[in-house]
Amino acid sequence: MLIRIVRMTFRPEGIEDFLQNFHAHKQSIRNFPGCSHLELWQDENDPSIFLTHSHWESEAHLNQYRDSELFKKVWLFTKTLFSDKPIAFSSKKIEEVEK
């Protein structure tokens, strides 16, 4: 499993447009082949920072999504709203510590 985190900083006037676009496409993204989890987070101290947290079966599945018309449509709109360059990284879970 591949875990993808994307940190995005928006212009304050672009936040509502981003949220509307995310909500319009979230089910399609979540149901894209290979995606098993999707969350949207907002920074506790800076309301202009959002992060997406998604799980993919493999890097190949993530790349299929990134090459899709869905991604191109969503990302083309989203990136017009940024106030800073996004930061994205992929990771794998090594260990989960239980209580």
Image (cartoon, grey):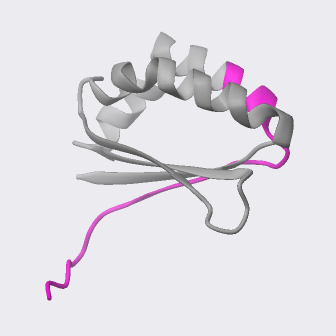
Q: Classify residue 35 as left or right of residue 44.
A: left
The location of residue 53, given as percent across then percent down, is 42, 50
Q: Depth check: 1 or 60 in front? A: 1
At x 70% / y 20%, what residue is drawn?
Answer: 77
Query: Count the marks: how many?
Result: 0
Of 94 and 23, the residue lying toward us? 23
Q: Is residue 25 visible?
A: yes
Give the image location of residue 2, x and y in percent: 30, 52
Tell me the residue at 59%/22% (across/down). Answer: 21
> Where, by quadrant of the figure, is residue 13 drawn?
top right
Residue pushed farthest left?
Answer: 98
Quadrant of image for the C terminus: bottom left
Task: Give the answer, above or below, for where 70 lies relative to 8.
Answer: above
- The residue lying toward the viewer, choosing from 88 and 18, is 18
Residue 65, by quadrant, is: top left
Q: In the visual, does 27 lie left or right of 90?
A: left
Farthest residue to the top: give it: 69
- The percent coordinates of residue 49 (x first, y second) are 69, 54
Q: Is residue 67 visible?
A: no
Extent of the magenta region? 77-99
Which residue: 30% across, 33% down? 61
Question: In the picture shown, does residue 55 fall above or below 26?
Answer: below
Q: Residue at x 69, y 68 (%)?
A: 45
Confirm whether the magenta stretch covers residue 53: no
Residue 41's place in the image compared with 21, above or below, is: below
Q: Judge left or right: residue 94 versus residue 46.
A: left
- Would you say 51 lies left or right of 78 here? left
| Residue 86 painted magenta | yes
Comparing 59 with 43, the one in front is 43
